[in-house]
Image (cartoon, rainbow, N blue to C red):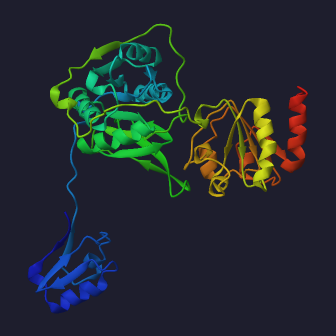
Amino acid sequence: MGIIIEQGLVNAQTAQTLVSLCPFGAISYENGELSVGMGCKSCKLCVNKGPQGVMRYQEEEKKEIDKGAWRGVCVFAERRGNSAHPVTMELLGKARELAAVTGHPVYALCIGQGLHDMAEELLHYGADKVFMYDDAAFADFCVGPYANAFCDFIQQVKPSSILVGATNLGRSLAPRVAAKCETGLTADCTMLQMKENTDLVQIRPAFGGNIMAQIVTPNTRPQFCTARYKVFSALPRAEKAEGEIVSMPVTAAMREGNTEVLATDAKPAQVDISEADVIVACGRGIKTQADLALAEELAKLLGAQMACTRPLIEAGWFDPRRQIGLSGRTVKPKLIICLGISGSVQFAAGMKGADCIIAINTDKNAAIFDIAHIGVVGDIYEILPLFIQNVKEGRHV
């Protein structure tokens, strides 16, 4: 597959022409034989412009897959403590929307120990079936055994699409499983759409957020993607649990792995602005680090978390975990107040799902006003003290 060389047509003259023609230096001629190295980009310049017949391009044969043999939209249910990580409920909500297009069921996959209560709860959030791999070997996350169980599920159930939360655990597990199953993986999706032929359109920012890439893998199953927390919305919890729980057998082969967990220590709670209901976000409009005191005072009054844009991280003013945007966290608070933030595509992608966005900026044409529910054109150094005073006095701002 790729560039094919007809060595019988190669001579010193044709070889010299082809070597000089390749812009990547990928073609070489040694001991009377022409070869194409790893630097080849398949630009086909040698085929189209080189001596006729010496080089030809052979397309890779496309695999034909029986899409009808793969059925269902599956969500990997990551565990947090004794319950499911909230991203699981968000993905179940999206899975129901995707499955409605094709009439497929929605599955949840649980791997761990002592999972029954968590599995039953998932039935309240839209799962038609919850598959459990419940065993002491899965008590602590270890990518080898988890991937073994995950692959067994794929072989047994054959889901058409699989959604995984883009958490630390999900980002470690999903690539391993996708590679073992020889299928593709699209990371950090912000939108998902389903075609009637069961092809999943996986949409994510590319080139620094300047374009939205639509990725489809029509010739492989399952279709695998990760999605960030707070990108999708969970369905309301149903009073009655519909569906069933299926306990999957765990074999000795599944328990095998190259890593052994000797002990676990609880990590101190860290800042997670993704969980915040109210956020005060600062941008380049804040002139000095000392001026953050005003924003911090407002945040304290509102019971809000402080957050920022990337330039303030690069300036060393904030912990990187407080950055909002494509290279930071995705948030969906009830209220976010943006102080001196222009509203780049990268920042907006991380917070545009907020219920209420208030923006203060001196530039009336700033992009942040395109998504803000309330926009104030003015100097934050004049407006913020008045804002704080009104909050202290309990008046409407």
Residue name at image x 28 percent, y 72 percent: 40
Determine if residue 134 is in view. Answer: yes
Q: Nearer the viewer, residue 175 or 97?
A: 175
Decide: is 221 above or below 210.
Answer: above
Hey, which quadrant is residue 334 in on the image? top right
Decide: is 284 above or below 349.
Answer: below
* 199 relative to 62 in the view: left or right: right
Q: Nearer the viewer, residue 336 or 65?
A: 336
* 353 relative to 243 in the view: left or right: right
Quarter the N terminus occupies? bottom left
Residue at the bottom extreme of this rendering:
13
Q: Position of residue 166 (x, y in %)?
A: 45, 39
Decide: is 236 above or below 216.
Answer: above
* 95 relative to 111 in the view: left or right: right
Determine if residue 378 is in view. Answer: no
Hey, which quadrant is residue 252 in on the image? top left
Q: Nearer the viewer, residue 357 or 110?
A: 110
Q: Position of residue 237 (x, y in %)?
A: 52, 15
Q: Position of residue 333 (x, y in %)?
A: 65, 32
Residue at the top extreme of this rendering:
240
Residue name at image x 41 percent, y 10 percent: 242
Residue at the left extreme of this rendering:
8
Residue name at image x 41 percent, y 28 percent: 78
Q: Position of residue 218 (x, y in %)?
A: 31, 44
Number of numbered labels in the structure image: 0
Quarter the C terminus occupies? top right
Decide: is 200 above or below 311.
Answer: above
